[in-house]
Amino acid sequence: MTKPGSRWISRYESVASLAEIRRRSRVQAIPLIGLGADPVEVACERIRQEWRRLFVPTDQACEIMLMVLGLALAHARLAYPNDVAMSARSYEEVLDIEPYVPICLTGLQGSGKSTLLRALGRVLPADDSIVVPCTGDRFPLVAMRAVVVKGLRSTPAVLRAIAGVKYSPQKTEDLANGCARWMYRCGCCLIALDELQFMTQSEQASALVCQVLLASTYLGVPMVFIPNYSLCHRLLGRPPETNQRLLTRPVIVVPDLPDSQDWRDFLAEYQKAVPGLFSFSFVEKANDLWNYCAGIKRNLAELLVKSYATARREGSTTATWEMVERTYHSVEYSVSRRDIEALVSYALTGACPIKNLVCPFQHDREGAYLARLKVVRSRKVADAVNDTALSQPERQALAQIERELSSEPAPVATAKKARTSLRSGPTTAAELSKNAGLILGRNKHN
C-alpha cells in the first residue's frame, strides 16, 4: 500500500544514489559531421555548442549532487509527512519558517559550476502534479526551481522568478510570504540561483546580492547559490551576521587532476564529438592539455576550438599539436594564458595579483591542485634551460627528431631552412644528430 505523503518524498529517494546520478546526468557526445563544409566560425560554434551540451559525471560532481539531493530529501520528509498535514498547511495564511543555511557552490570561472547545476536538473524527475485524496485538491509537483539571476535587478524580481510565472501577488509587502506558501504548495524542495555576480553594478556592490540571498532563505526551501570567487570575497567583507547566514556551507568545485580517470574520460568524450578534426589523441596528450588550461574545461574548449580555426585558415581540416602550442602563445588566448600563469605563480609563492583566481575558503582538495600547478612551472623552467643551451642548428635538429618521434609531418618552410643550414654550416648532420640525442637523453649514435 502507498504510504501517505510518499509522492513528495519518493521522487527524491529514487535518485539519491551515486549510480542513478551517474546514469541520469551523463550526456554522451554526438559526433559532428560536415564541419569542413561550414564557414570557419560556424564550424567553431557548432563544436562549442556540442562540448557545452555533453556531460561526463566525475566523482566530484556526483558527490556534490548526492549531497544536494540529500538535503532536498530531508526537507521533503520533514515538510510533507502525510497528505492531511500537507493540505492543511498549504492554506495557512502565514507559514512559520525557519530559514535554511544555503550551500555556496563556488570555484574557478569555467570550472563547471553551472554545468553541474544543469546536470542536477537532469537527475531530478520532471515536473508533475498530485491529487490529495483527503480533499480532492490537485497540487503541482516541482522538484527544483533554478533561476539565472543575470538580468534581474531587485529582490522582488528574483522572488517572483523563483516562484514562477503562475504566482504573482498584488502587494509587494506580501510577496515573501506569498512566495513561500506557493513554493510549499508546489512541493518544491530545492532552489538554485546562478550568475549572481551580474546583479552587482561595481566591484564593491554586494548589498543587493545579500538582500536577495537572505530573502530567498526565508522561502523555507533548501537553496544552492553559485557565486564566483570574486563575489565570495566581497560577501566575506559584509558584516559577520551576514556571513554566518550565507557562507558557512561552502562547496568548492576543483578542476580534475591530469592523471585522474575523470580527466581522461572527459577528454575521450570531447574527442568523440569531433572525429578526425585533430591529428593527436586527447587522452595521450592529457598532461600537456591540462598544463595549457590548468584543468579548467572552458579554457580547454577555447584552446582547442581556436586551434581548429587556425588549421582551417591555413587550408587544413585537421589541427596538429603544433597548432595547439601556437594557439597557447597567441594573442587570442592571452587572457586565459595570463590566468593560468597567475595560478602557477600563486601555487609557488602564495600570492596572486588576480583576486578572482584565489579561493576564499580553505579546503582539502586545493593542496593537490596547487601541487600539480607547481609541476607545470618546473617543466617550463626545464624546457627554458634546455632551449637556451642549444645553438640554432641544434634546435632545428632537435625539432626534426621530435617531429619524427611524434609522427607529425615537418612544416615545409622549417624543413627547407634546416636543410639549407646543414649544407652551409661547418657542422655535419651526424654531429647535429648526436648533439640532439644527447639533449634528449637518447644518444643514438654512441
Image: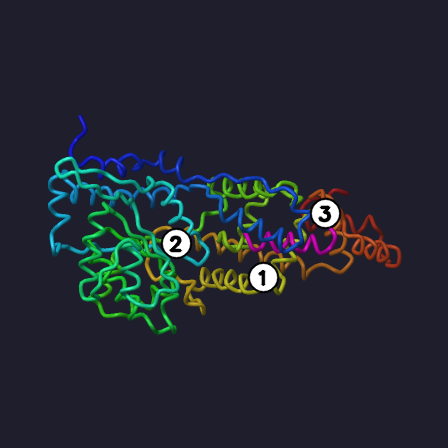
As drawn, 136 above or below 414 = above
Q: As shown in the figure, which amino acid type bears the numbered disc 1?
A: Tyr
- The residue at the point 47 percent across, 52 percent down is 372
Q: What span is colored magenta in the figure?
A: 301-317
Closer to viewer: mark 1 or mark 2: 1
Is 366 one of the magenta-colored residues?
no
Q: In this rendering, would 263 be left or right of 77?
A: right
Q: For the residue carrying disc 2, how many other residues have a C-alpha within 10 Å: few (<14), some (14-19), or many (20+)?
A: some
Q: For the residue carrying disc 1, how many other residues have a C-alpha within 10 Å: few (<14), some (14-19), or many (20+)?
A: some
- The residue at the point 60 percent across, 63 percent down is 332
Residue behind mark 3 = 403
Specify the quadrant of the image occupied by residue 351.
Answer: bottom left
Instruction: Kindly give the residue lying farthest to the top in the view shown.
Output: 1
Q: Is mark 3 on a helix, strand or loop?
A: helix
Residue closer to the observer: 236 or 12: 12
Residue closer to the observer: 348 or 273: 273
Question: Which one is earlier in the sequence, the residue at label 1 or at label 2?
Answer: 1
Residue behind mark 1 = 333
Residue behind mark 2 = 366
Residue at mark 2 to residue at mark 3: CA–CA distance: 36 Å
Residue at mark 1 to residue at mark 3: CA–CA distance: 24 Å
Determine whether label 1 and label 2 are within 8 Å by CB.
no
Q: What element carries label 2?
A: helix
Q: As shown in the figure, which amino acid type bears the numbered disc 2?
A: Glu
As drawn, 392 above or below 69 = below
Q: As shown in the figure, which amino acid type bears the numbered disc 3?
A: Arg
